[in-house]
Image (cartoon, rainbow, N blue to C red):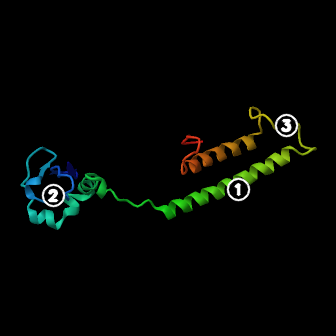
Amino acid sequence: MSIGTASTSVELSSTAPSSPPSTRRDSISTSNTTGAEEPALTEEEIEKKPWKYIGYKGYSKFIASDNDFYVVRKFATLNTRVTLALQDEIVVLESDLDVLDAQYSKRDAENLHNGLFRDDRQDRNALIKKIASKLAKYSEQFPSPLGFSKF
């Protein structure tokens, strides 16, 4: 694997699974963009700046090398909070739709067929599209009992 900047790239050799990224001098070589070989990095250089020569690329490779290392946060509290906020937005939109439905069902309202979507009013149609988008995001959070992953 290589880590590069505009003028220098660093080559890291593969590490064996279950071993941290190597900081051995022979595992890292450098060359500039013209292809000319630069002097090898010293162990001291690598030890002083592992963030530069190994970085997240090497760290990611190490973590991915074994399932036991693959431990990441699921941000359960944040995901729940976002889901609850989305749920609240959907509730507000649902209420707005109920208001429109009631308005278009009044005796003195224009004769609009409330059982069709094809020729529906633009405002209600736009609201339904907005609800559909929010519901799709919301539904991604939950497995469906019917086996559908999305609405």
The residue shown at (28%, 52%) is 64
Disc nearest the viewer among 2 and 3: 2
Residue 23 relative to residue 129: left or right: left
- Is residue 126 placed above or below 41 in the rendered structure? above
What is the secondary structure assignment of the residue under circle 3? Answer: loop
Identify residue for label 3: 112
Three-letter code, disc 1: Val
Task: Tell me, for residue 92, which label it has, or none.
Answer: 1
The residue shown at (23%, 62%) is 51
What is the secondary structure assignment of the residue under circle 1? Answer: helix
Label 1 packing within 10 angstroms: few (<14), some (14-19), many (20+): few
Q: Which quadrant holds the C terminus?
A: top right
Identify residue for label 2: 22
What is the secondary structure assignment of the residue under circle 2? Answer: loop
Contact (Cβ within 8 Å) of mark 3 with mark 1? no
Three-letter code, disc 3: Leu
Q: Position of residue 118 (x, y in %)?
A: 74, 32
Disc nearest the viewer among 3 and 1: 1
- Is residue 55 placed above or below 134 in the rendered structure? below
